[in-house]
Amino acid sequence: MSRIQTQQTKKPIKRVAVIGAGPAGAIAIDALAQERAFDLIRVFERREGPGGCWIGDKDRPQPLTGFASLASRTADPPVPIPHTLPALTPKLDQPRFTESSVYPYLETNVDALPMQFSQEPFPSEKSDFSINLHGPQTPFRHWKSVRGYIEGLVNRNGYQDLVSYNTTVERAEKVGDEWKVTLRKEGQQKDYWWTEWFDAVVVASGHYWVPWIPEVDGLEAFEKMRPGSVIHSKHFRGRDLYEGKVCISCSPLFLFSKTNPPKQKVVVVGASVSAADIAYDLAHSRTAHCPVVHAITVGRNFNGYFGDEAFRHPRIENHPSISRVCPETRTVFLVDGTSIPNVDHIIFGTGYSWSLPFLSPQVPIRNNRVPDLYQHVVWQKDPSLLFVGAVGAGLTFKVFEWQAVYAARILAGRAPVPDGKEMQKWEEERIKVRGDGPKFSVIFPDFEEYFETLRKLAGEGETARGVGRKLPRFKPEWFRAFMEGHDLRKRMWKRVNEQDREEEKKEKKGEVRAKL
């Protein structure tokens, strides 16, 4: 094992660029700063403030375009760089997928205990919405609490002065033993481009930005005939947008009034947590009720943490996959030969595509994961490039902290880096067990092993004299709270499903009496 400055650069790391000021970037800033080893730490965040995907948007997202590139996971290519820098150019019109994925009443789906970093307690404030669903001891938090938590991490100790907002890293390339970082800052009318130079780069930009929507014949034409009728779950802005418009497929016997407005027919595609939340929300609230929400779940794998209870709601009808869509009749045809006519909206909760256009082509994406990362952190080909947050869901905030401290210790020269063969062997062995796709990056269920491995790799550094973040031992109660939070949500879905099922029975009895 060797130190990074002798292995790769032959000089100490003194200038570090951090890409992203979401939860991974926020904890990376503190981990780096506490090492007290760097002359310059610069953070580049393309949104207007800290928070990452927990920032809310005031405006509705633009309608989706480029469905073929979304399906092929090529929708976020590198942008052309001006030949001469610095430069002022017309504002970029290429979609960059920076829009938020939150809606007004979004709550966390993970207990606050496993979400919080080890030295920074999570806000205790609980929303009335969450209390009504889960009781006064609800472990979940409103999205604004999460945003405020991240903002507080960045706006402490003068860290806010390290961050350049509305600034996109468009290219990061190694030139000699330095990283040349090309930046674009959005102005009101023009974009300003320039370059800065660093000894190391920490990528903490996340991977929940570019939506993945599968290829479906007729889908793009369906969207073009009524822009906004096809969205990804990240563009869902709440149930209210799906009520009060004419739904031509409802029974003519159904009488509409100001207190009983017509509903829209909605198809939700996907069997994981976002699709479950949206389908359940629309069904339970009766916002989209025509007479049911149509969920494309049959034959799909349900989320391993949350299961299928949300899709068991009495006003959700589950279907197999879509074969094609007819734009003219707005009919969704299914692989079993059946169809759903007169559809108003199709919502895809089908996940995201990893995208690193600023590192292309030197760091490729393979099978929707970043290859050549040792312990999901160290780029094997050059350990002066490190990642925080390149993992799947599960104890993610805490994982970010352990990764950030390990990365910071490496750059400070206080943690060794294995040789290339050892790092490559680790990846090869993991591929044998997890495969070479997204499951490679899923830590569950081996949280304790992973946390303790990173803690040992990071070492104590110089924490004995107050330098650097000290990582505690893994606590099983973090994992327990994580799983119990999922069980709480599943029990809530089951309880409400049973209540709504009884309500449906009473309503049907009432309709029968009315006819008599």
Image (spheres, grey):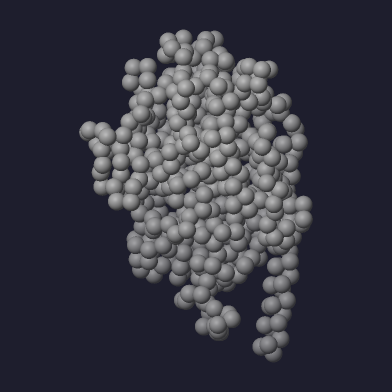
Q: Position of residue 190 (x, y in %)?
A: 29, 47
Residue that appears at 58% across and 80% down? 260
Residue that appears at 44% across and 23% down? 15
> Which of 408/236 is in front?
408
Quadrant where the image shows the C terminus: bottom right
> Which of 191/325 is in front?
191
> Is residue 26 among the parts visible in the rendering?
no
Q: Please identify the residue farthest to the left as the structure is shown.
A: 83
Dividing the picture into quarters, in which one does residue 228 lie?
A: bottom left
> Which of 388/460 is in front?
460
Residue that appears at 73% across and 76% down? 506
> Is residue 228 among the parts visible in the rendering?
yes
Q: Is residue 89 left or right of residue 276?
A: left
Q: Position of residue 319 (x, y in %)?
A: 55, 59
Q: Is residue 90 left or right of residue 243?
A: left
Compared to residue 75, the image places residue 129 above or below, namely below
Residue that appears at 54% across and 10% down? 1
Compared to residue 124, the image places residue 331 above or below, namely below
Q: Position of residue 222 (x, y in %)?
A: 37, 62
Dividing the picture into quarters, in which one does residue 333 lie?
A: bottom left
Compared to residue 66, the image places residue 456 above or below, namely above
